[in-house]
Image: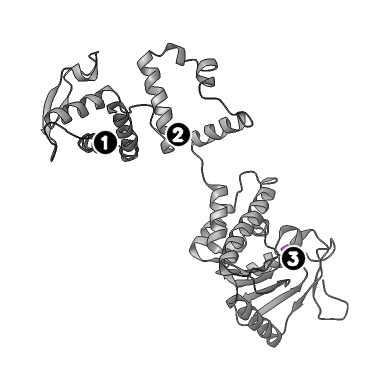
Amino acid sequence: MSANNSDLFIVDNSISGWTGLRYLEEWTEISTRFDIATEFFEIGSLLALDGKWQQLDKIRILMGNETTFRTRRELGKALKERTQEVLDRSLEEAKKPNPFLEGVEAIAEALRSGKIECRIYTKDKFHAKAYITHGRQAVVGARALVGSSNFTEPGLSRNIELNVQIQTGADVALLQEWYEEHWEDAEDISELALDVIDRQIRAYSPFEVYAKSLQELFRGHSLTGNEWDQTDSKMFPYLDQYQKEAYWAMVDIARRNNGAFLCDGWGKKAAARVYHICRSGRDIEFPSPFTGGPATRKPVKPVEEVPGAPIPARSLYDASQALSWVASRRNNPEERTAWQIQIPSLVEDLAAKKD
């Protein structure tokens, strides 16, 4: 609002006057960029301007930091933790009226492209609040709104604030000079902000949702080794003994290697191939893959020679090379890597049985 008989323009979020949000919305229509100084920044402010801020070519956000640090190492760690904490909190607040965070993807893309830049001033406590708007037309020029409003949704629309517009070109230029000086001294946190946002809007796979549901279901209850197998599993009682042993071996491998494949793992077929490579130096195929019996007695057809394989294998190293050959022939890259990771533990098992 304007005071009677005065050029002073006040933005205070009053019902009868102007809100900071309305002020910025109108300037997005005629501006190329915003330079914003704020003690606090929340994603909700940009969400409130969704559909408007996209008209700008550039937004720079210079924000404050609540504490000081003795070293750059402390600073880097604290900046990351603080950015995650503040932006996570603001995103959680944004989910209340906007559970699917509509509009956040556009913010993330703007951070990636550099259209939005974020920096934190760390040299001293930063308490400034200013919005410098740069008009597209020379006749409009630049203006600045200076006062108490943080770049947050409450600061722009709900809190009782007091901001006044700086209108003369000389005064705005002086304020711009102040802004550039503090911008150059600030730490860039655009990547940190993007990391937090990406984590909030990432599309989770059905398996990740299922795994998280299981984690929440069993929170506070740590299952003992065989508790679930013996009491809750519907399938375990129907497994043959060799299948149970394979399952227990897989669990042991998973504990040691942070993961293992339950299906299509080192089964009888792989065991037979390793056996014949160690014995004859040749890989094999199975004319009748579903024939029962031990792996060493299945009918096989010799195929390609394994380069460098000694005939017969004489050491655990030779056996590990045969295991590596079989693992390297997996078609799926993730499966191939998983098999190769398991080779050391399999060699350990062979060594234990040899002893």
Packing grade of label 3 (10 A; few <14, some 14-19, many >=20) is many
Looking at the picture, how far across and down is residue 309, in whole percent? Answer: 14, 37
The amino acid at mark 2 is Arg
Can residue 50 be seen at all in this image of the molecule?
Answer: no
**Separation of disc 1 and disc 3 at Cα?**
63 Å
**Separation of disc 1 and disc 2 at Cα?**
20 Å
**Separation of disc 2 and disc 3 at Cα?**
55 Å
Q: Quadrant of residue 317?
A: top left
The amino acid at mark 1 is Ala
Residue under label 1:
327
Labels 1, 2: front one: 2
Q: Nearer the viewer, residue 338 or 33?
A: 338
Residue under label 3:
20
Left or right relative to 6: residue 197: left
Can residue 323 be seen at all in this image of the molecule?
Answer: yes
Looking at the picture, how far across and down is residue 46, in whole percent? Answer: 64, 59
Disc assigned to residue 153: none
Packing grade of label 1 (10 A; few <14, some 14-19, many >=20) is many
Which segment did they paint magenta? 18-22
Q: Secondary structure at mark 3?
A: helix
Q: Secondary structure at mark 1?
A: helix
Q: Secondary structure at mark 2?
A: helix
Residue projecting furthest to the front: 355
Residue under label 2:
255
Labels 1, 3: front one: 1
Labels 2, 3: front one: 2
